[in-house]
Image (cartoon, rainbow, N blue to C red):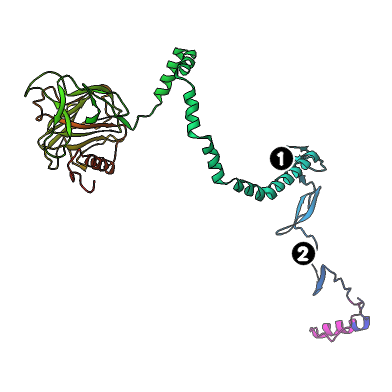
Amino acid sequence: MQVRTSAARLIFSAVVATGVAEVVGCTVNAPPPQDLSGDALTVSKGRLQIDSDKVPVVTEPCTEGQTVVRSADGWACAPTVLGVSAGAGLSGGGAGDVSLAVDFGDGDTEVASGARTLALETAAAVTTADVANLGDRVVTLEGQGLDARVAGLEGQGLDARVETLEGQSLDDRVATLEGQGLDARVVELEEQLAVLPTPTIIAAYDVNSRSGTLWNAIGVGEPLFLGTDVGRVDIAGPPAVDGIGRVSGGGAVGGGPLGQRLLELPARDFAIELVVQGSEQIFVHGTDGLSLQVVGTEVVVREFGRDLRSTAPAFSSSSPNHLVYVHTATDERQFFVNGQSITTSSTGRWTGPYLGERGVFSLGSRLAGAAGSSPVYFKVVIHGAAPNAASVLAACEAAESAGILNINVCPSTP
């Protein structure tokens, strides 16, 4: 900047003379300011401003080997070396100048080879063809028809199957079994017996199965030995059927119970059904001493010397009654008289499983009186599965229909 000398002297003289500086005016000769504005640069009031969104600007200088990168908060210094990670089917990777290798193979994590790709494409084509043919296959199956399939089975014929079995004579079958060796067969049969379930009916007897001194089982089980002093007893009044009872003299001791046989009962889930007339001991079985006694209208079930006592609904001792003792699968004891459940009172009764196992099952008592005064039996069934109340009622009604019980003895509901 240049100022004329004469003007300067005049101003200075005025200041010295008056002591007051009064600026009269001056002229400055200078070139116009240079325009420094650009895409990221602007000049405002003589200040240079930089747009940091376009130009990298850091507050501290970067160190050697770093570069300026964009960050969430602006610009920052970062290493120039970047890492590369390998994925499935690749190997290699790392930081800096690295190489990646492709792992071709047939595994799930490998890059499929050409052979595997071709196999997959072929499988896809086959699957598509199967789907396309599904409708035809359904039509084919339907075309066979259920009636035709049934007719094919019936065509084999039951008679032909029976004839085939009959054609294998008993002697040939026995010879075949003997050829397998007796010891081997015994072992095989014992193994089969060990897994056999308890039959639904363990034993069943009625008055029509009596033959001599035996009460023959009906279809299952073994006969019940009656003894020499037991005979058929005529029962007066309806129902007009005969029963089996003692014929010894009144109060006589000896001759044993009315009937007995060796019997094995399961630990639980069984029942003993009887149709019997009269009172006293009805049955007893096993080392547990499970027994049923009827004295008047009082019913006593005894096991291990512990009693379940109850008063049965009114029933006539001069006509048959339907009695069912039940040991459930959960070790609950129940008792039914003529199809109706009765409540029992406990005197410390045994609540666990039945422990009688295999033992003598006896009907009646050694102390039976004359015929007609001691129990007279019409039916005995030992069930290998505990019936429910509805099944007990149905059995009672079946005895009515067979003429063993008087009509309308069983209630209409259990």
Q: Which of 171 and 180 is in front in this view?
A: 171
Left or right of 98: which side holds 195? left
Amino acid type, callout 1: Thr
Image spot of residue 103 (x, y percent): 78, 38
Residue 326 higher or lower than 249, as above or below = below
Q: Is 323 a magenta residue?
A: no
Q: Give the magenta part as a residue range.
A: 8-32
Quadrant of the rendered structure where residue 322 is?
top left
Amino acid type, callout 2: Asp
State which quarter of the image contains the N terminus.
bottom right
CB atoms at circles 2 and 1 under 8 Å apart? no
Q: Nearer the viewer, residue 98 or 270?
A: 270
Please tell me which of labels 2 and 1 falls first in the chain.
2
Left or right of 306: which side holds 328? right
Res. 208 visible in picture: yes
Q: Mark 1 = which residue?
A: 109
Q: Mark 2 = which residue?
A: 53
Left or right of 302: which side holds 96? right
